[in-house]
Image: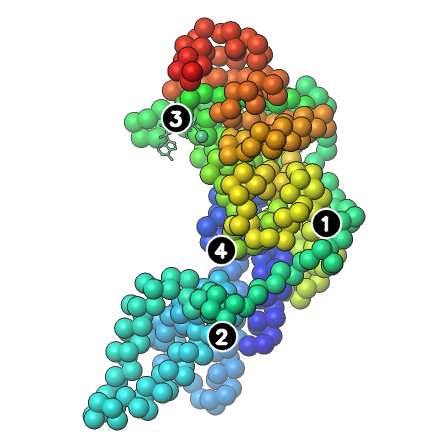
Amino acid sequence: VGVALWLCSNLLSSREGRAIRCLKGGRTMAAAMGVNVPLVKLKVFVLASVLAAVSGWMYVHFQRFVNPTPFGLNYGIEYLFMTVLGGAGFLPGAILGSGIITALREWLVEYLPALVGQNGNYETVVLAVLIIFIPHRAPDGLWPLLVKFLKIKETSKFSEANVSTDLLLERKNANHSSGESLLVLEHVSKRFGGLLAVNDVSFKVKAGEILGLIGPNGAGKSTTFNLLSGVNPASTGKVTFLGQDITNLQSYQVAKLGMSRTFQHVQLLPNLTVLENVAIGAYLRCDAGYLKSMLHLERDEESRIISESIRMLKRVGLDKHAYTLAGNLSLGDQRILEIARALCSDPVLLLLDEPAAGLRLKEKEELAKLLQQLRKEGMGVLLVEHDMDFVMGLVDRIVVMEFGEKIAEGLPEEIQNNPVVLEAYLGSAD
Ligand code: ADP
Ligand code: MG
């Protein structure tokens, strides 16, 4: 048990471990960072099976005889309940859950019949009540409650003292020369049942430019983002990225080519530190696998990832919060965290879905400065935004959408004076 815990705890705090943690509540995000989610699920399943097999093997040696009972359905349910009771997703939860159930059963088998006055399997009744009661009252299991009750401080592996900031992580993508077409959309449409959310939209994003995508609520901007980044493939039309047809690629495959994104509705792991959340972005820039991580032989690579993550946090001005839990940040800071995470993947093209929503004026100015710096470095940026002042002063070109259609495209001045846009968008906004 000790060895299994050590191996698993090493794994969970590694590059692959962060991907595993994303399986609970952050799958779209993980895929956007280049994680092949179904493959990770399969690997976790195999790992769990290997551990179960080892314990079965030991059990046989211990008992000196084997029959199928301990491997039957009833026990399967009991093992599952141990996990749920202790807390799925927490290593100490495994010990807690199995400890409680095993002790409780022994105790009930001994004392319940005496209490009732006749023989019978009364423990089953008590356990059944628990199975109904616990998931209802403590959906995350008992471990998180215990942590809260005993005020156990869960310390992060990382702190200012043991994190170096000058280790370099290899770059993943070459710079592209300014003006080169990165992303090309040709007559792209997306249909949800009877609703045509994106209708025959075409535009280009070049290296070294910021393209603003604006339009009223429900215009189809986020849907366009999702079909570009492989979350929801286009129904018809063609999307090309760096000369390659990506129309039907999966999210993680698109990420591999050098596209990174943030989400309109922030997607992060609230129980991990800001630093670890940003480190998820570096997934594709390293390759330590399960075995290496479990034996903790990826220290060198891991230090580089952490070093790079700190640098990205400095870049967006969030380094003072590096060791706080991401869930404790303000919404504005969580958006900035997402940008740091996206940058950590060293993207060629950055997609930002309403990054300035919830930011204060000063923070917006900082964000604008950062985006201008990225543009200078040759990155392409596609920016969906509501805040017109923010967009107009920053972007090179604008595409305007309404009811899923592109109604205008041009320089900010042209858009500001375009009667169709004024009518459709600005007119209704004022
Ligand atoms: P925007 O980001 O411009 O505000 P969206 O792209 O989010 O707009 O939405 C465009 C339209 O598509 C809306 O009418 C929305 O209800 C619809 N829509 C978005 N996603 C889905 C989905 N997964 N299923 C069905 N309809 C959707
Ligand atoms: Mg949107």
- Per the image, the residue denoted by label 3 is 218
- Residue identified by numbered label 4: 41
Q: Which residue is mark 1?
A: 307
Among the two numbered marks 3 and 4 on one chain, the one whose residue lies closer to the N terminus: 4
Q: Ligand 1 is found in which quarter of the picture?
A: top left
x, y (%) of residue 405? 42, 18
Question: Which numbered disc, 2 or 1, marks the residue that appears first in the sequence?
Answer: 2
- Cα–Cα span, label 1 and label 3: 40 Å
Q: Is residue 253 above or below residue 13?
A: above
| Distance in Å between CA atoms under marks 2 and 1 | 34 Å
Q: Callout 2, which amino acid?
A: Ile
User: Mark 1 or 3 closer to N-term?
Assistant: 3
Residue named by callout 2: 95
Q: Amino acid at mark 4?
A: Lys
Q: Is mark 3 within 8 Å of ligand 1?
A: yes
Judge left or right: residue 31 versus residue 308. left
- Determine the CA span between mark 2 and mark 3: 48 Å
Question: Which quadrant of the figure contains the N terminus?
Answer: bottom right
